[in-house]
Image: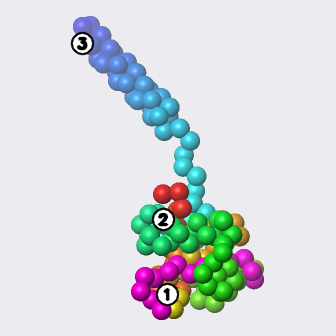
Amino acid sequence: MFNRRRISAALIGLIVLVLGGWAIKEVVAGDPPAEVPGASSGLPVVTLSSLPPETSETLRLIRSGGPFPHRQDGTEFGNREKLLPTKNSGYYREYTVPTPGARDRAARRLVTGASSELYYTGDHYRSFVVVDPGR
């Protein structure tokens, strides 16, 4: 009889601990983080802070509407390589990310989508990553 009480008390204690831990986790975690626009494309997602520092300045210019250092900045990106999700003409815009020491636009670009997507290429459209601008 004594062993049954001990086992019952241990089981009740375990259940209380599990439920208490679950409740605390829910309160601490809060809302799940918002999905990064473009993450569903299947491309790798990287933080803005992991990209070259000039990328942040280009994003600042995009958000403020310019002025941009190159006349091509803000023009339509045609996605001819088909590496980004297929969208209608005019959906994507491209912007130069300066490369220190380069005498021309070089290879680095930010490409924006009409639904707030942000893509980066450091190799002139051969590959892309999705940029999480919040981190």
From the viewer's perspective, tell me whether residue 64 is left or right of residue 104: right
Whether 98 is among the magenta residues is yes
Q: Mark 2 points at which residue?
A: 48
Whether 31 is among the magenta residues is no
Q: Nearer the viewer, residue 93 or 55?
A: 55
Crowding at dot 2, Cα within 10 Å, few <14 / some 14-19 / many 20+, comes out as some
Identify which amino acid the numbered label 1 is placed on. Ala
Q: Is residue 38 visible?
A: no
Crowding at dot 1, Cα within 10 Å, few <14 / some 14-19 / many 20+, comes out as some
- Residue 107 shows which numbered tag? 1
Identify which amino acid the numbered label 3 is placed on. Asn
The residue range painted magenta reads 89-103
Q: Say whether marks 3 and 1 touch (CB < 8 Å).
A: no
Cα distance between the residues tagged 1 and 2: 18 Å
Q: Which residue is drawn at 48% across and 73% down?
A: 54
Element marked by disc 2:
helix
Q: Which of 34 and 19 is in front in this view?
A: 34
Provide residue 10's location: percent of width, then percent of height.
30, 18
